[in-house]
Amino acid sequence: AILVLVFLFGKYSDSILHFTQKTVPLHSTTEPAPPIASSTDVLILLNQDSATIQHMDGKNERMLLDVFFKKFAQFTLPAEGSKLSTGIVTPFPDPKLEKGAIPSPDWKYTARLAEPRADGATSIFLKPKMQNARTIILREGNQPLRDGSFAGWFDEKNMAIVAYTDQNKSLYSAGLDGSLKKIVPMPDTVVMSTMRHGIFWYVTATLGQGIETPPSSPSELHRVTLDGKEVRMAREEKQVITGILAETNGRIAYSLDNGESVLSGLGLPNGQLNIGSRHPVALVSDGHVIIRDGFSLMAFDPATGATSKLSEIPEGEISVFVLH
């Protein structure tokens, strides 16, 4: 899988320049793009063999993947990203992590669902970085949480769990100390959910009559924070929301089941902007949106509609990770 990370160039420029000692030459197939005004971000593209540093002026360089992991071991890498094709979140695929494990934001812990228990209670296998692993059994009073799923982390000390007690499904916060708190009840019409930067997002739609019948509109996008505040962020009357790319500052990009994408929370005159079949893959700190347009990686300015081509997109499954 190919991953994309966004690094603040001003903060990491010295380390990035050191990579040139062990890089493998990469010959760009496109002319360098004009520099993006006010942007100092750098894109890092990884596949199973190599890492490419893509600068906003169109220049790029490549190194072996193991060199990348060694060089960036000192930084706190992101724990979550999104698939390029759908926007659905995918955990950071560090080869050192167990399958299904998601690191905490500070990388001091990794957590995953533990093996099923005989009593049906959901449990979390928690592994501190420098201590022995332990299992947290999730119970609300005397009732075990059942059919649970581990969504990710609200913060460095609280995990997000979606699970049932009796017939009721809810979003819970599970603490490192074993504490459990119900955040909000979850509706039966949820068709997808994800964690983005410590915020839980979920999408509702009209469910089909059977397994083979896909959900239909209307569809809504909701966000939930650790303090239990829930806000409806978008509603689509004619399409179903299928993917989410969101930032803590309120900027949102989401994809629809007709192949189009919508930008929201970017200070646009009408609040939202439908950008057609171009798929957002990262939200850059200066307001630009990095999009996939066919086989090209582009920088898009929502305020003016202008685009600047950065590079060609390599083949294969691509995921996007952002480090601010």
Image (tube, helix red, strand yellow):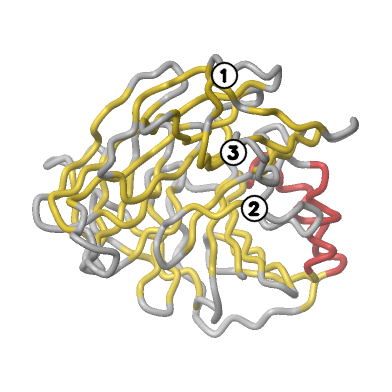
Q: CA distance from mark 3 to mark 1?
A: 17 Å
> Of the residues under marks 1 and 2, which one precedes in the sequence?
2
1 or 2: mark nearer the eye: 1
The image position of residue 98, as x and y in percent, is 76, 53
Q: Which residue is mark 3?
A: 120
Q: Position of residue 320 (x, y in %)?
A: 53, 58
Which mark is first along the chain, 3 or 2? 2
Does residue 254 appear to the left or right of 159 in the view shown?
left
Packing grade of label 2 (10 A; few <14, some 14-19, many >=20) is: many
Mark 2, residue position:
92
Q: Which residue is mark 1?
A: 180
Residue 141 position, x and y percent, is: 54, 14
For the residue marked with disc 2, what is the amino acid? Phe
**Spatial distance from mark 2 to mark 3, Cα to Cα?**
29 Å
Q: Is residue 54 left or right of residue 231?
A: right
Q: Residue at x 65, y 43 (%)?
A: 113
How crowded pointer 1 is (Cα within 10 Å; few <14, some 14-19, many 20+) is rated as some
